[in-house]
Amino acid sequence: MKNSMDDTLSGSTETKTLSAELAEHLCERIRNDRLAPGARLGTESDLAVQFGVSRTVVREAIGSLRGLGVVTGRQGRGLCVAETDNFSSVLRKALVPQVASSSGLHELQQLRAVIEIGSIALAVELITFEEIIRLQTIVGEMKRVMKNIKTDEERTSNAYKELDCLFHQIILAASHGSFVKQFHGVLLDYFHAGEFYNDIPCNKCLREHEKIANAIAERDVDKATKYLTEHLRPQLKALEK
Amino acid sequence: MKNSMDDTLSGSTETKTLSAELAEHLCERIRNDRLAPGARLGTESDLAVQFGVSRTVVREAIGSLRGLGVVTGRQGRGLCVAETDNFSSVLRKALVPQVASSSGLHELQQLRAVIEIGSIALAVELITFEEIIRLQTIVGEMKRVMKNIKTDEERTSNAYKELDCLFHQIILAASHGSFVKQFHGVLLDYFHAGEFYNDIPCNKCLREHEKIANAIAERDVDKATKYLTEHLRPQLKALEK
DNA sequence: ATCATAATTATTGTATGATAAATTTGGTGA
DNA sequence: TCACCAAATTTATCATACAATAATTATGAT
Protein backbone atom coordinates (compact mmCIF):
# COMPACT_ATOMS: atom_id res chain seq x y z
CA MET A 1 0.00 0.00 0.00
CA LYS A 2 2.99 2.28 -0.33
CA ASN A 3 1.59 3.68 -3.50
CA SER A 4 2.83 7.22 -3.12
CA MET A 5 -0.74 8.27 -2.85
CA ASP A 6 -0.69 11.94 -2.41
CA ASP A 7 -1.74 12.46 -5.97
CA THR A 8 -3.39 15.80 -5.85
CA LEU A 9 -4.31 15.53 -9.50
CA SER A 10 -2.17 18.55 -10.23
CA GLY A 11 -0.08 16.48 -12.54
CA SER A 12 -1.19 17.46 -15.96
CA THR A 13 -3.34 19.98 -17.70
CA GLU A 14 -5.35 22.22 -15.45
CA THR A 15 -8.01 23.06 -17.94
CA LYS A 16 -10.33 20.18 -17.22
CA THR A 17 -12.52 19.78 -14.18
CA LEU A 18 -11.40 17.83 -11.17
CA SER A 19 -13.89 15.07 -11.79
CA ALA A 20 -12.85 14.61 -15.40
CA GLU A 21 -9.24 14.57 -14.38
CA LEU A 22 -9.91 12.02 -11.66
CA ALA A 23 -11.89 9.82 -14.03
CA GLU A 24 -9.00 9.90 -16.46
CA HIS A 25 -6.56 9.09 -13.68
CA LEU A 26 -8.58 6.14 -12.40
CA CYS A 27 -8.96 4.83 -15.91
CA GLU A 28 -5.24 4.97 -16.42
CA ARG A 29 -4.64 3.24 -13.12
CA ILE A 30 -6.95 0.41 -14.05
CA ARG A 31 -5.29 0.08 -17.38
CA ASN A 32 -1.72 0.28 -16.16
CA ASP A 33 -2.20 -2.00 -13.19
CA ARG A 34 -4.05 -4.45 -15.40
CA LEU A 35 -6.93 -4.58 -12.97
CA ALA A 36 -9.28 -7.32 -14.08
CA PRO A 37 -13.05 -7.04 -13.89
CA GLY A 38 -14.09 -7.60 -10.31
CA ALA A 39 -10.96 -6.05 -8.82
CA ARG A 40 -11.67 -3.79 -5.88
CA LEU A 41 -11.05 -0.07 -6.14
CA GLY A 42 -11.69 0.94 -2.54
CA THR A 43 -14.54 3.10 -1.38
CA GLU A 44 -15.58 6.54 -2.47
CA SER A 45 -14.34 7.98 0.79
CA ASP A 46 -10.97 6.29 0.32
CA LEU A 47 -10.55 7.82 -3.08
CA ALA A 48 -11.69 11.18 -1.75
CA VAL A 49 -8.95 11.33 0.84
CA GLN A 50 -6.38 9.75 -1.47
CA PHE A 51 -6.81 12.45 -4.06
CA GLY A 52 -7.63 15.25 -1.69
CA VAL A 53 -11.03 16.04 -3.13
CA SER A 54 -14.55 15.89 -1.81
CA ARG A 55 -16.74 12.86 -2.16
CA THR A 56 -18.84 14.84 -4.63
CA VAL A 57 -15.99 14.93 -7.10
CA VAL A 58 -15.24 11.26 -6.60
CA ARG A 59 -18.86 10.38 -7.18
CA GLU A 60 -18.96 12.40 -10.35
CA ALA A 61 -15.84 10.73 -11.68
CA ILE A 62 -17.13 7.31 -10.72
CA GLY A 63 -20.48 8.13 -12.27
CA SER A 64 -18.74 8.92 -15.50
CA LEU A 65 -16.78 5.68 -15.46
CA ARG A 66 -19.91 3.82 -14.52
CA GLY A 67 -21.63 5.22 -17.57
CA LEU A 68 -18.69 4.06 -19.64
CA GLY A 69 -19.02 0.57 -18.24
CA VAL A 70 -15.63 0.75 -16.56
CA VAL A 71 -16.56 0.51 -12.90
CA THR A 72 -19.52 -0.66 -10.91
CA GLY A 73 -20.41 -0.35 -7.27
CA ARG A 74 -23.10 -1.59 -4.98
CA GLN A 75 -24.23 -0.28 -1.68
CA GLY A 76 -22.29 -1.72 1.18
CA ARG A 77 -19.68 -3.27 -1.10
CA GLY A 78 -17.54 -0.55 -2.56
CA LEU A 79 -16.29 -0.03 -6.09
CA CYS A 80 -14.82 -2.51 -8.49
CA VAL A 81 -13.86 -2.82 -12.12
CA ALA A 82 -16.93 -3.65 -14.20
CA GLU A 83 -17.52 -6.79 -16.17
CA THR A 84 -17.19 -6.58 -19.91
CA ASP A 85 -20.77 -7.52 -20.63
CA ASN A 86 -23.24 -4.91 -21.84
CA PHE A 87 -20.65 -3.10 -23.88
CA SER A 88 -23.44 -2.77 -26.37
CA SER A 89 -25.42 -0.36 -24.23
CA VAL A 90 -22.36 1.80 -23.70
CA LEU A 91 -21.67 1.99 -27.39
CA ARG A 92 -25.30 2.66 -28.14
CA LYS A 93 -25.21 5.74 -25.94
CA ALA A 94 -21.82 6.93 -27.09
CA LEU A 95 -23.02 6.96 -30.68
CA VAL A 96 -26.07 9.07 -29.99
CA PRO A 97 -24.55 12.42 -30.98
CA GLN A 98 -23.06 10.82 -34.06
CA VAL A 99 -26.43 9.93 -35.55
CA ALA A 100 -27.69 13.49 -35.38
CA SER A 101 -25.81 14.62 -38.44
CA SER A 102 -26.11 13.05 -41.86
CA SER A 103 -22.34 12.91 -42.16
CA GLY A 104 -22.16 11.09 -38.85
CA LEU A 105 -24.75 8.63 -40.02
CA HIS A 106 -22.80 8.03 -43.13
CA GLU A 107 -19.67 7.39 -41.12
CA LEU A 108 -21.52 4.79 -39.08
CA GLN A 109 -22.89 3.15 -42.17
CA GLN A 110 -19.40 3.02 -43.55
CA LEU A 111 -18.05 1.44 -40.40
CA ARG A 112 -20.81 -1.13 -40.45
CA ALA A 113 -20.10 -2.04 -44.04
CA VAL A 114 -16.38 -2.23 -43.32
CA ILE A 115 -16.94 -4.60 -40.42
CA GLU A 116 -19.18 -6.87 -42.42
CA ILE A 117 -16.85 -7.02 -45.39
CA GLY A 118 -13.91 -7.63 -43.09
CA SER A 119 -15.75 -10.51 -41.47
CA ILE A 120 -17.03 -12.29 -44.52
CA ALA A 121 -13.95 -14.47 -45.05
CA LEU A 122 -14.10 -15.76 -41.52
CA ALA A 123 -17.84 -16.16 -41.72
CA VAL A 124 -17.66 -18.28 -44.85
CA GLU A 125 -15.14 -20.48 -43.15
CA LEU A 126 -17.00 -20.94 -39.89
CA ILE A 127 -20.64 -20.80 -40.86
CA THR A 128 -22.68 -23.87 -39.98
CA PHE A 129 -25.12 -25.72 -42.16
CA GLU A 130 -28.02 -24.50 -40.07
CA GLU A 131 -26.98 -20.92 -40.60
CA ILE A 132 -26.66 -21.45 -44.33
CA ILE A 133 -30.17 -22.83 -44.40
CA ARG A 134 -31.41 -19.83 -42.46
CA LEU A 135 -29.76 -17.46 -44.92
CA GLN A 136 -31.47 -19.15 -47.82
CA THR A 137 -34.77 -19.21 -45.99
CA ILE A 138 -34.48 -15.47 -45.48
CA VAL A 139 -33.83 -14.91 -49.17
CA GLY A 140 -36.91 -16.98 -49.90
CA GLU A 141 -38.93 -14.91 -47.48
CA MET A 142 -37.66 -11.76 -49.15
CA LYS A 143 -38.88 -13.00 -52.50
CA ARG A 144 -42.28 -13.74 -51.02
CA VAL A 145 -42.47 -10.34 -49.35
CA MET A 146 -41.50 -8.58 -52.56
CA LYS A 147 -44.58 -9.86 -54.29
CA ASN A 148 -46.82 -7.95 -51.93
CA ILE A 149 -44.95 -4.75 -52.43
CA LYS A 150 -47.71 -3.05 -54.34
CA THR A 151 -50.62 -4.05 -52.16
CA ASP A 152 -49.12 -2.97 -48.85
CA GLU A 153 -46.22 -0.66 -49.34
CA GLU A 154 -45.58 0.24 -45.74
CA ARG A 155 -45.62 -3.12 -44.09
CA THR A 156 -43.75 -4.75 -46.92
CA SER A 157 -40.96 -2.27 -46.55
CA ASN A 158 -40.68 -2.90 -42.83
CA ALA A 159 -40.76 -6.65 -43.22
CA TYR A 160 -38.09 -6.42 -45.86
CA LYS A 161 -35.91 -4.25 -43.66
CA GLU A 162 -36.30 -6.73 -40.84
CA LEU A 163 -35.22 -9.58 -43.08
CA ASP A 164 -32.34 -7.53 -44.40
CA CYS A 165 -31.03 -6.92 -40.89
CA LEU A 166 -31.43 -10.57 -39.99
CA PHE A 167 -29.52 -11.58 -43.08
CA HIS A 168 -26.53 -9.44 -42.24
CA GLN A 169 -26.63 -10.37 -38.58
CA ILE A 170 -26.42 -14.05 -39.38
CA ILE A 171 -23.34 -13.46 -41.46
CA LEU A 172 -21.72 -11.55 -38.63
CA ALA A 173 -22.74 -14.10 -36.03
CA ALA A 174 -21.06 -16.77 -38.11
CA SER A 175 -17.71 -15.05 -37.73
CA HIS A 176 -17.69 -16.02 -34.05
CA GLY A 177 -16.27 -12.87 -32.62
CA SER A 178 -18.55 -11.81 -29.83
CA PHE A 179 -17.13 -8.33 -29.80
CA VAL A 180 -17.36 -7.91 -33.52
CA LYS A 181 -20.89 -9.22 -33.42
CA GLN A 182 -21.97 -6.93 -30.58
CA PHE A 183 -20.48 -4.03 -32.37
CA HIS A 184 -22.14 -4.78 -35.61
CA GLY A 185 -25.39 -5.34 -33.76
CA VAL A 186 -25.40 -1.83 -32.35
CA LEU A 187 -24.61 -0.30 -35.70
CA LEU A 188 -27.24 -2.37 -37.43
CA ASP A 189 -29.67 -1.25 -34.76
CA TYR A 190 -29.15 2.38 -35.66
CA PHE A 191 -29.22 1.45 -39.29
CA HIS A 192 -32.55 -0.21 -38.76
CA ALA A 193 -34.18 2.29 -36.41
CA GLY A 194 -33.16 5.47 -38.16
CA GLU A 195 -34.56 6.27 -41.54
CA PHE A 196 -31.16 7.34 -42.72
CA TYR A 197 -30.65 4.76 -45.37
CA ASN A 198 -33.35 2.87 -47.14
CA ASP A 199 -32.15 -0.19 -48.85
CA ILE A 200 -35.24 0.02 -50.94
CA PRO A 201 -36.68 -3.36 -51.64
CA CYS A 202 -35.77 -3.88 -55.24
CA ASN A 203 -35.05 -6.82 -57.44
CA LYS A 204 -31.45 -5.79 -57.73
CA CYS A 205 -30.89 -6.00 -53.99
CA LEU A 206 -32.76 -9.24 -53.85
CA ARG A 207 -30.55 -10.78 -56.48
CA GLU A 208 -27.49 -9.54 -54.61
CA HIS A 209 -28.66 -11.19 -51.43
CA GLU A 210 -29.28 -14.36 -53.32
CA LYS A 211 -25.84 -14.34 -54.87
CA ILE A 212 -24.20 -13.71 -51.51
CA ALA A 213 -26.12 -16.50 -49.86
CA ASN A 214 -25.24 -18.90 -52.65
CA ALA A 215 -21.57 -17.96 -52.57
CA ILE A 216 -21.52 -18.57 -48.83
CA ALA A 217 -23.29 -21.88 -49.26
CA GLU A 218 -20.61 -22.93 -51.71
CA ARG A 219 -18.02 -21.66 -49.26
CA ASP A 220 -16.48 -19.57 -51.98
CA VAL A 221 -14.68 -16.79 -50.13
CA ASP A 222 -13.71 -14.77 -53.17
CA LYS A 223 -17.18 -14.71 -54.67
CA ALA A 224 -18.80 -13.96 -51.33
CA THR A 225 -16.41 -11.06 -50.75
CA LYS A 226 -16.99 -9.75 -54.24
CA TYR A 227 -20.77 -9.83 -54.08
CA LEU A 228 -20.93 -8.46 -50.57
CA THR A 229 -18.62 -5.60 -51.49
CA GLU A 230 -20.84 -4.80 -54.44
CA HIS A 231 -23.91 -4.96 -52.29
CA LEU A 232 -22.47 -2.61 -49.69
CA ARG A 233 -20.80 -0.37 -52.21
CA PRO A 234 -23.10 2.65 -51.78
CA GLN A 235 -22.58 2.64 -48.02
CA LEU A 236 -18.89 2.02 -48.25
CA LYS A 237 -18.18 4.88 -50.56
CA ALA A 238 -16.54 7.87 -48.97
CA LEU A 239 -18.49 10.99 -48.37
CA GLU A 240 -18.55 12.99 -51.58
CA LYS A 241 -17.46 16.54 -51.23
CA MET B 1 -42.88 23.48 -24.53
CA LYS B 2 -46.00 21.40 -23.97
CA ASN B 3 -43.89 18.35 -23.61
CA SER B 4 -45.94 16.58 -20.97
CA MET B 5 -43.10 17.08 -18.61
CA ASP B 6 -44.11 15.45 -15.44
CA ASP B 7 -41.93 12.48 -16.14
CA THR B 8 -41.21 11.17 -12.73
CA LEU B 9 -38.96 8.50 -14.16
CA SER B 10 -41.28 5.86 -12.78
CA GLY B 11 -41.84 4.56 -16.25
CA SER B 12 -39.79 1.44 -16.48
CA THR B 13 -37.74 -0.89 -14.37
CA GLU B 14 -37.25 0.22 -10.81
CA THR B 15 -34.10 -1.70 -10.24
CA LYS B 16 -31.65 0.92 -11.45
CA THR B 17 -30.68 4.06 -9.63
CA LEU B 18 -32.40 7.34 -10.30
CA SER B 19 -29.33 8.80 -11.94
CA ALA B 20 -28.87 5.87 -14.29
CA GLU B 21 -32.51 5.99 -15.21
CA LEU B 22 -32.35 9.71 -15.87
CA ALA B 23 -29.23 9.33 -17.98
CA GLU B 24 -30.98 6.69 -20.05
CA HIS B 25 -34.02 8.89 -20.40
CA LEU B 26 -32.05 11.94 -21.51
CA CYS B 27 -30.12 9.85 -23.99
CA GLU B 28 -33.32 8.56 -25.49
CA ARG B 29 -34.72 12.04 -25.68
CA ILE B 30 -31.70 13.29 -27.54
CA ARG B 31 -31.89 10.38 -29.90
CA ASN B 32 -35.61 10.53 -30.51
CA ASP B 33 -35.80 14.29 -30.90
CA ARG B 34 -32.79 14.18 -33.20
CA LEU B 35 -31.06 16.85 -31.17
CA ALA B 36 -27.95 17.91 -33.02
CA PRO B 37 -24.64 18.68 -31.32
CA GLY B 38 -24.90 22.14 -29.82
CA ALA B 39 -28.61 21.90 -29.04
CA ARG B 40 -29.46 23.25 -25.63
CA LEU B 41 -30.75 20.95 -22.93
CA GLY B 42 -31.66 23.50 -20.28
CA THR B 43 -29.96 23.86 -16.94
CA GLU B 44 -29.37 21.35 -14.22
CA SER B 45 -32.02 23.00 -12.08
CA ASP B 46 -34.52 22.84 -14.93
CA LEU B 47 -33.99 19.12 -15.32
CA ALA B 48 -34.15 18.66 -11.57
CA VAL B 49 -37.62 20.14 -11.31
CA GLN B 50 -38.76 18.57 -14.59
CA PHE B 51 -38.02 15.09 -13.36
CA GLY B 52 -38.73 15.70 -9.72
CA VAL B 53 -35.31 14.81 -8.42
CA SER B 54 -32.57 16.69 -6.68
CA ARG B 55 -29.82 18.47 -8.52
CA THR B 56 -27.44 15.84 -7.19
CA VAL B 57 -29.15 13.16 -9.27
CA VAL B 58 -29.19 15.37 -12.33
CA ARG B 59 -25.51 16.11 -11.98
CA GLU B 60 -24.70 12.45 -11.67
CA ALA B 61 -26.71 11.60 -14.77
CA ILE B 62 -25.14 14.46 -16.69
CA GLY B 63 -21.72 13.42 -15.46
CA SER B 64 -22.30 9.99 -16.86
CA LEU B 65 -23.41 11.33 -20.22
CA ARG B 66 -20.51 13.73 -20.21
CA GLY B 67 -18.14 10.82 -19.80
CA LEU B 68 -19.84 9.15 -22.74
CA GLY B 69 -19.31 12.24 -24.85
CA VAL B 70 -23.04 12.83 -25.21
CA VAL B 71 -23.45 16.16 -23.44
CA THR B 72 -21.21 19.00 -22.40
CA GLY B 73 -21.77 21.97 -20.18
CA ARG B 74 -19.85 25.05 -19.23
CA GLN B 75 -20.26 27.38 -16.35
CA GLY B 76 -22.73 30.10 -17.06
CA ARG B 77 -23.93 28.48 -20.27
CA GLY B 78 -25.97 25.44 -19.40
CA LEU B 79 -26.01 22.01 -20.95
CA CYS B 80 -25.97 21.04 -24.59
CA VAL B 81 -25.46 18.03 -26.80
CA ALA B 82 -21.76 17.38 -27.26
CA GLU B 83 -19.83 17.62 -30.47
CA THR B 84 -18.78 14.40 -32.10
CA ASP B 85 -15.08 15.05 -31.85
CA ASN B 86 -12.99 13.18 -29.30
CA PHE B 87 -14.94 10.00 -29.73
CA SER B 88 -11.55 8.39 -29.52
CA SER B 89 -11.09 9.21 -25.87
CA VAL B 90 -14.52 7.81 -25.05
CA LEU B 91 -13.79 4.58 -26.82
CA ARG B 92 -10.36 4.37 -25.26
CA LYS B 93 -11.90 4.43 -21.81
CA ALA B 94 -14.77 2.14 -22.63
CA LEU B 95 -12.36 -0.53 -23.79
CA VAL B 96 -10.29 -0.49 -20.63
CA PRO B 97 -12.00 -3.42 -18.90
CA GLN B 98 -11.86 -5.36 -22.16
CA VAL B 99 -8.08 -5.38 -22.28
CA ALA B 100 -7.74 -6.94 -18.86
CA SER B 101 -8.52 -10.44 -20.04
CA SER B 102 -6.64 -12.27 -22.74
CA SER B 103 -9.90 -13.21 -24.42
CA GLY B 104 -10.92 -9.57 -24.46
CA LEU B 105 -7.62 -8.62 -25.99
CA HIS B 106 -8.08 -11.21 -28.63
CA GLU B 107 -11.54 -9.89 -29.43
CA LEU B 108 -10.09 -6.43 -29.91
CA GLN B 109 -7.35 -7.73 -32.13
CA GLN B 110 -9.94 -9.51 -34.16
CA LEU B 111 -12.01 -6.37 -34.51
CA ARG B 112 -8.98 -4.42 -35.58
CA ALA B 113 -8.08 -6.96 -38.22
CA VAL B 114 -11.67 -7.05 -39.43
CA ILE B 115 -11.75 -3.29 -39.82
CA GLU B 116 -8.51 -3.17 -41.71
CA ILE B 117 -9.46 -5.96 -44.07
CA GLY B 118 -12.84 -4.39 -44.62
CA SER B 119 -11.19 -1.11 -45.52
CA ILE B 120 -8.53 -2.31 -47.86
CA ALA B 121 -10.62 -2.18 -51.02
CA LEU B 122 -11.57 1.42 -50.37
CA ALA B 123 -8.03 2.27 -49.37
CA VAL B 124 -6.58 0.89 -52.58
CA GLU B 125 -9.02 2.94 -54.55
CA LEU B 126 -8.48 6.22 -52.73
CA ILE B 127 -4.86 6.10 -51.66
CA THR B 128 -2.69 8.95 -52.96
CA PHE B 129 0.73 8.73 -54.51
CA GLU B 130 2.29 10.36 -51.49
CA GLU B 131 0.79 7.73 -49.24
CA ILE B 132 2.02 4.96 -51.49
CA ILE B 133 5.51 6.40 -51.30
CA ARG B 134 5.26 6.56 -47.54
CA LEU B 135 4.21 2.92 -47.38
CA GLN B 136 7.18 1.88 -49.42
CA THR B 137 9.49 4.06 -47.38
CA ILE B 138 8.26 2.34 -44.25
CA VAL B 139 8.95 -1.07 -45.74
CA GLY B 140 12.43 0.12 -46.59
CA GLU B 141 12.92 1.34 -43.04
CA MET B 142 11.75 -2.01 -41.75
CA LYS B 143 14.37 -3.76 -43.80
CA ARG B 144 17.02 -1.45 -42.43
CA VAL B 145 15.86 -1.95 -38.85
CA MET B 146 15.81 -5.70 -39.29
CA LYS B 147 19.52 -5.79 -39.93
CA ASN B 148 20.25 -4.46 -36.47
CA ILE B 149 18.09 -7.02 -34.82
CA LYS B 150 20.96 -8.94 -33.33
CA THR B 151 22.98 -6.04 -32.04
CA ASP B 152 20.19 -4.28 -30.22
CA GLU B 153 17.25 -6.55 -29.68
CA GLU B 154 15.14 -4.26 -27.53
CA ARG B 155 15.25 -1.06 -29.48
CA THR B 156 14.99 -2.82 -32.79
CA SER B 157 11.79 -4.50 -31.68
CA ASN B 158 10.26 -1.22 -30.59
CA ALA B 159 11.24 0.58 -33.74
CA TYR B 160 9.79 -2.24 -35.77
CA LYS B 161 6.54 -2.14 -33.85
CA GLU B 162 6.33 1.58 -34.41
CA LEU B 163 6.79 1.16 -38.12
CA ASP B 164 4.28 -1.66 -38.18
CA CYS B 165 1.63 0.57 -36.58
CA LEU B 166 2.41 3.40 -38.95
CA PHE B 167 2.08 1.07 -41.90
CA HIS B 168 -1.39 -0.06 -40.94
CA GLN B 169 -2.47 3.42 -39.97
CA ILE B 170 -1.61 4.78 -43.37
CA ILE B 171 -3.72 2.13 -45.02
CA LEU B 172 -6.66 3.03 -42.81
CA ALA B 173 -6.18 6.74 -43.28
CA ALA B 174 -6.36 6.20 -47.02
CA SER B 175 -9.88 4.86 -46.72
CA HIS B 176 -11.07 8.34 -45.85
CA GLY B 177 -13.55 7.47 -43.18
CA SER B 178 -12.76 9.59 -40.18
CA PHE B 179 -14.79 7.40 -37.91
CA VAL B 180 -13.27 4.21 -39.19
CA LYS B 181 -9.85 5.76 -38.87
CA GLN B 182 -10.41 6.99 -35.32
CA PHE B 183 -11.70 3.64 -34.37
CA HIS B 184 -8.82 1.79 -35.81
CA GLY B 185 -6.48 4.27 -34.18
CA VAL B 186 -7.73 3.46 -30.72
CA LEU B 187 -7.51 -0.26 -31.32
CA LEU B 188 -4.04 0.05 -32.78
CA ASP B 189 -3.09 2.06 -29.74
CA TYR B 190 -4.00 -0.78 -27.43
CA PHE B 191 -2.37 -3.19 -29.81
CA HIS B 192 0.77 -1.15 -29.63
CA ALA B 193 0.83 -0.33 -25.94
CA GLY B 194 -0.13 -3.70 -24.56
CA GLU B 195 2.25 -6.57 -24.92
CA PHE B 196 -0.57 -8.84 -25.91
CA TYR B 197 0.56 -9.62 -29.38
CA ASN B 198 4.04 -9.46 -30.66
CA ASP B 199 4.25 -9.36 -34.36
CA ILE B 200 7.80 -10.51 -33.98
CA PRO B 201 10.07 -8.87 -36.48
CA CYS B 202 10.70 -11.69 -38.88
CA ASN B 203 11.48 -11.97 -42.51
CA LYS B 204 8.13 -13.55 -43.18
CA CYS B 205 6.27 -10.52 -41.85
CA LEU B 206 8.58 -8.22 -43.70
CA ARG B 207 7.87 -9.96 -46.98
CA GLU B 208 4.17 -9.76 -46.26
CA HIS B 209 4.36 -6.04 -45.71
CA GLU B 210 6.30 -5.68 -48.90
CA LYS B 211 3.77 -7.67 -50.88
CA ILE B 212 0.90 -5.65 -49.46
CA ALA B 213 2.59 -2.35 -50.24
CA ASN B 214 3.34 -3.46 -53.79
CA ALA B 215 -0.19 -4.67 -54.39
CA ILE B 216 -1.52 -1.35 -53.19
CA ALA B 217 0.94 0.51 -55.38
CA GLU B 218 -0.34 -1.45 -58.35
CA ARG B 219 -3.88 -0.72 -57.17
CA ASP B 220 -4.65 -4.38 -57.33
CA VAL B 221 -7.57 -4.81 -54.92
CA ASP B 222 -7.71 -8.57 -55.06
CA LYS B 223 -4.04 -9.10 -54.38
CA ALA B 224 -3.99 -6.50 -51.63
CA THR B 225 -6.97 -8.13 -49.94
CA LYS B 226 -5.41 -11.54 -50.25
CA TYR B 227 -2.04 -10.57 -48.82
CA LEU B 228 -3.51 -8.48 -46.05
CA THR B 229 -5.85 -11.29 -45.04
CA GLU B 230 -2.91 -13.65 -44.92
CA HIS B 231 -0.90 -11.17 -42.90
CA LEU B 232 -3.67 -10.69 -40.35
CA ARG B 233 -4.69 -14.31 -40.34
CA PRO B 234 -3.41 -15.15 -36.84
CA GLN B 235 -5.29 -12.23 -35.32
CA LEU B 236 -8.41 -12.84 -37.30
CA LYS B 237 -8.76 -16.42 -36.32
CA ALA B 238 -11.46 -17.17 -33.80
CA LEU B 239 -10.55 -18.00 -30.26
CA GLU B 240 -9.74 -21.69 -30.12
CA LYS B 241 -11.73 -23.40 -27.46
C1' DA C 1 -19.79 -26.08 19.13
C1' DT C 2 -22.83 -24.90 15.28
C1' DC C 3 -26.11 -22.69 12.86
C1' DA C 4 -29.87 -19.41 12.26
C1' DT C 5 -31.24 -14.89 13.35
C1' DA C 6 -30.83 -10.24 15.01
C1' DA C 7 -28.01 -6.11 15.63
C1' DT C 8 -24.36 -3.32 14.04
C1' DT C 9 -21.43 -1.36 10.80
C1' DA C 10 -19.86 0.03 6.22
C1' DT C 11 -20.94 2.00 1.95
C1' DT C 12 -23.48 3.84 -1.69
C1' DG C 13 -27.74 6.75 -3.06
C1' DT C 14 -30.11 10.99 -2.50
C1' DA C 15 -31.11 15.53 -0.64
C1' DT C 16 -30.02 20.27 0.90
C1' DG C 17 -27.50 24.35 1.34
C1' DA C 18 -23.56 27.19 0.53
C1' DT C 19 -19.53 29.21 -1.88
C1' DA C 20 -16.46 29.88 -5.87
C1' DA C 21 -15.60 30.48 -10.68
C1' DA C 22 -16.92 31.23 -15.31
C1' DT C 23 -20.14 32.97 -18.66
C1' DT C 24 -23.71 35.70 -20.38
C1' DT C 25 -26.48 39.81 -20.20
C1' DG C 26 -27.56 44.37 -19.62
C1' DG C 27 -26.47 49.02 -18.80
C1' DT C 28 -23.65 53.25 -18.78
C1' DG C 29 -20.71 56.59 -20.51
C1' DA C 30 -17.75 58.48 -24.05
C1' DT D 1 -21.28 52.55 -31.96
C1' DC D 2 -18.05 50.75 -28.92
C1' DA D 3 -15.62 49.73 -24.72
C1' DC D 4 -16.07 48.72 -20.07
C1' DC D 5 -18.21 47.53 -15.72
C1' DA D 6 -21.90 45.40 -12.86
C1' DA D 7 -25.40 42.06 -12.16
C1' DA D 8 -27.59 37.80 -13.02
C1' DT D 9 -26.98 32.77 -14.50
C1' DT D 10 -25.08 28.61 -14.18
C1' DT D 11 -21.82 25.07 -13.44
C1' DA D 12 -18.06 23.24 -10.11
C1' DT D 13 -16.92 22.05 -5.73
C1' DC D 14 -17.51 21.51 -0.85
C1' DA D 15 -19.73 20.03 3.51
C1' DT D 16 -23.25 17.64 5.88
C1' DA D 17 -27.09 14.79 6.70
C1' DC D 18 -30.05 10.92 6.18
C1' DA D 19 -31.94 6.75 3.82
C1' DA D 20 -31.23 2.21 1.70
C1' DT D 21 -28.73 -1.78 1.15
C1' DA D 22 -25.08 -5.06 1.65
C1' DA D 23 -21.57 -7.05 4.69
C1' DT D 24 -20.06 -8.17 9.26
C1' DT D 25 -20.53 -9.22 13.86
C1' DA D 26 -22.96 -10.53 17.92
C1' DT D 27 -26.43 -13.29 20.00
C1' DG D 28 -29.09 -17.12 21.27
C1' DA D 29 -31.14 -21.63 20.78
C1' DT D 30 -30.31 -26.35 20.04
Image: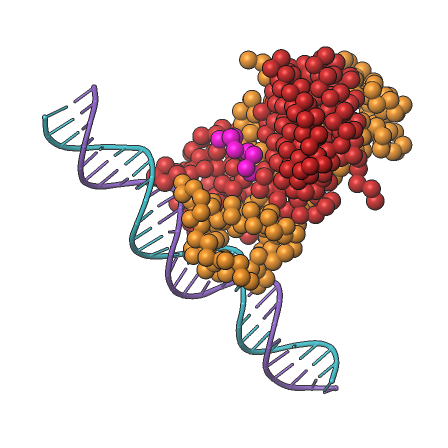
Chain colours: A orange, B red, C cyan, D purple
Residue C6 screen position, x and y as percent = 60, 78
Residue A17 screen position, x and y as percent = 42, 44
Query: Where's the C terminus of chain A, which quadrant?
Result: top right
Q: Residue at x 71, y 13 (%)?
A: B219
Q: Which residues are magenta?
A: B83-90
Please tell me which residue lies in front, A188 or B153.
B153
Q: Residue at x 59, y 17 (%)?
A: A239
Is residue D2 found left or right of B126 in the rendered image?
left
In this rendering, the answer to whether C21 lies above or below B83 is: below
Residue B58 in view in this figure: no
Please tell me which residue lies in front, B122 or A134.
B122
Residue A138 in view in this figure: yes
Q: Residue at x 62, y 13 (%)?
A: B129
Query: Where's the N terminus of chain A, which quadrant?
Result: bottom right
Residue B125 screen position, x and y as percent = 68, 14
Q: Is residue B86 magenta?
A: yes
In this rendering, the answer to whether A174 lies above or below A78 is: above
In this rendering, the answer to whether A192 lies above or below B190 is: above
